[in-house]
Image (tube, grey):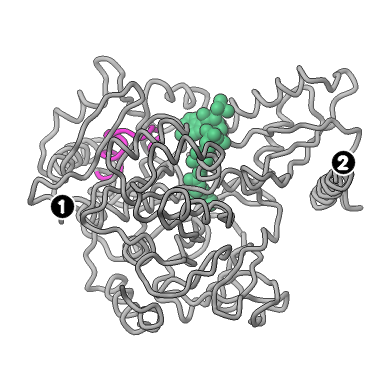
Amino acid sequence: MRDYATAASEFDYHQTVSAILSGDLAAMNACVECCDRHADTDKVALIWEGREGQRATWTFSQLKDAASRFANFLDSHGIKPGDTVAGLLPRTPELLITILGTWRVGAIYQPLFTAFGPKAVEHRLKESGAKLVVTNTANSEKLDGIEAAPSRLVVGNGADDFWTHVNRESPDFAPVLLDGDAPFLAMFTSGTTGPAKQLHVPLKAIVAFVTYMRDAVDLQPEDNFWNIADPGWAYGLYYAVTGPLAMGHSTLFYEGGFTVDSTCRVISEYNITNMAGSPTAFRLLLASRDEVESKIKGRLRAVSSAGEPLTPEVIRWFAAGLGCKIHDHYGQTELGMVLCNHHALSHAVNIGTAGYAMPGHRVVVLDDQHRELGPGEPGMLALDRNQSPLLWFNGYAGTRTKAFVSHYYLSGDTVELNPDGSISFVGRSDDVITTSGYRVGPFDVESALVEHPAVIEAAVIGKPDPERTELVKAFVVLHASHQGDKALAEQLQLHVRQRLSAHAYPREIEFVSELPKTPSGKIQRFLLRDQEKNAKQASTAAAS
Ligand SMILES: CC(C)(COP(=O)(O)OP(=O)(O)OC[C@H]1O[C@@H](n2cnc3c(N)ncnc32)[C@H](O)[C@@H]1OP(=O)(O)O)[C@@H](O)C(=O)NCCC(=O)NCCSC(=O)CC(=O)O
């Protein structure tokens, strides 16, 4: 095992790699990194299990062939380097071929989560200016009402199917080489005062993704790896697709939804030894501990967790009940992972913390005046841009949202440095909600609610929850003509699920006569959060 202190001090090495990838010397293509480099043998790249139990494996070489055909399709339809192609697809081989083929022509891939409704899809497509969306028959109608929608290619669309078009094309397409600062992913992340914001990920970020897979996930050639996160988001796209494939390792797409039973079955049937996912999933496994222990004890070697803080109870159960280490990691769409309890670097693991700065990054804690804080004082997690050669984030596209102050990137997360150098997560310093590992913007949910004819206005907060970290809770003011009852609450939930997204709907709705506001009319969400905390404390006190 490599020594953490040595790895973390390799500043010159990381700087050199980063400089080479950004300079004139660079000639990168993400499809080459994630496919061509590993295509000279029969190595498996993708193991797929479909929603109906269908199974298939794809080698790197087969993927290269299909991605090249798709690249020719894109080229013949006028997609040029720097254009954006979106994927609104579940975890299927067609999704991976879309991603790789888009990269091959030097274009930018934009993920669209399949739980999104038309509102979330429309906003993201307008912002990105995507020229083409690849989707399937189940999701295609989400594009129907979009004004000036991009053209679409649909999987399962009879004579006009994805494969009909792709199979017609030649399997030869020379990858377009770009420098390391050229974007290859268009990501969106939720904000607090406005709709989701776009950011571009440059090709050189692949180096940081691979460093994470090697040092923190400890992905070994003999591992069978499964990251359960959906590639519609950063965790899945960076670390279930790009990271493992760039290492020449296979990845597993399990298309079905999450259940304890299916998770145990997949781990057993595919001999999974190295796994990744969000704490909510691991807490759901813990809730069925007897069943899970009887099915998978001793099978896993290393497990990584990110998206929300991992509770110590889960860490202890993994060690005692499953005979396996689970380590907490912290990242953002803007950063990738930057704090890790590394599986492959030797340092003491401080249980309950997000871990130590990933090599190539200098992570600091800042006070309100942007001065660096020492241990024991909560402040804002920030990245020192001058001393983080693997940091690739360069700001949001097309918004005036400020991410940088001086040479720091400000994360919006409140953390605390511990005396041993590890960092503990304390909470968000804004109104962004963390639920089931997803970052949900209150503004997006509020905007969807007020589109319902019964609603005058709404305020949305995260309510602390032992299983999902926070639940999305909405406080809703109704027009006088409507009655705030259970039936209307269910109607509003359905409305948000269908318009915005199935994962971001308010699981709790409270009807109120007014919302707390500043004199200038801004909703004071923190007062609603305090109210929820006080109510919880009062009920705990009454119960004891
Ligand atoms: C922990 C879970 C397995 C729990 O799954 P559950 O299905 O119980 O609950 P959920 O809240 O996710 O789902 C709510 C509803 O959305 C539906 N749903 C979920 N995923 C879906 C998908 N891919 N396509 C279509 N529908 C989907 C579910 O069926 C459910 O519907 P119904 O209610 O009908 O059952 C999952 O939430 C999960 O994988 N979370 C991890 C998220 C993650 O990867 N985070 C890191 C990246 S976030 C990130 O990178 C963003 C950022 O930081 O900016």
Residue 418 in the image: x percent, y percent? 61, 76
**Kind of residue at badge 2:** Leu
Q: CA distance from mark 2 to mark 1?
A: 56 Å
Residue shown at 54% from the left, 39% from the top: 284
Going by the image, does 32 lie left or right of 235?
left
Report the residue marked by disc 2.
Answer: 515
Identify the residue at horizontal 41%, vertical 41% (top origin).
Answer: 130
Q: Position of residue 399 (x, y in %)?
A: 58, 56
* Horizontal arrangement in the rendering, residue 489 relative to residue 319 (left or right): right
Element assignment for label 1:
helix
Give the residue drawn at x 73%, y 38%: 473
Which residue is tagged 1?
36
Sequence-earlier tag: 2 or 1: 1
Question: Which x, y percent locates residue 378?
Answer: 70, 72
Q: As displayed, is residue 246 above or below residue 260?
A: below
Chain part drawn in magenta: 87-100
Residue occupying image coordinates x 21% and y 54%: 222
Label 2 beta carbon less than 8 Å to ligand 1 = no
Element at label 2: loop
Q: Nearer the viewer, residue 303 or 52?
A: 303
Mark 2, Cα crowd under 10 Å, few <14 / some 14-19 / many 20+, is some
Front residue of 453 and 248: 248
Q: Could you tell me residue 410's position as x and y percent?
A: 60, 68
150 vs 314, left or right, is left
Looking at the image, can residue 525 be seen?
A: yes
Number of numbered discs: 2
Q: Is residue 364 depicted above or below 203 in this figure? A: below
Of 194 and 343, nearer the camera is 343
Indicate the quadrant containing the N terminus: top left, top right, bottom left or bottom right. bottom left
Q: Quadrant of residue 488?
A: top right
> To which quarter of the image does residue 136 belong?
top left
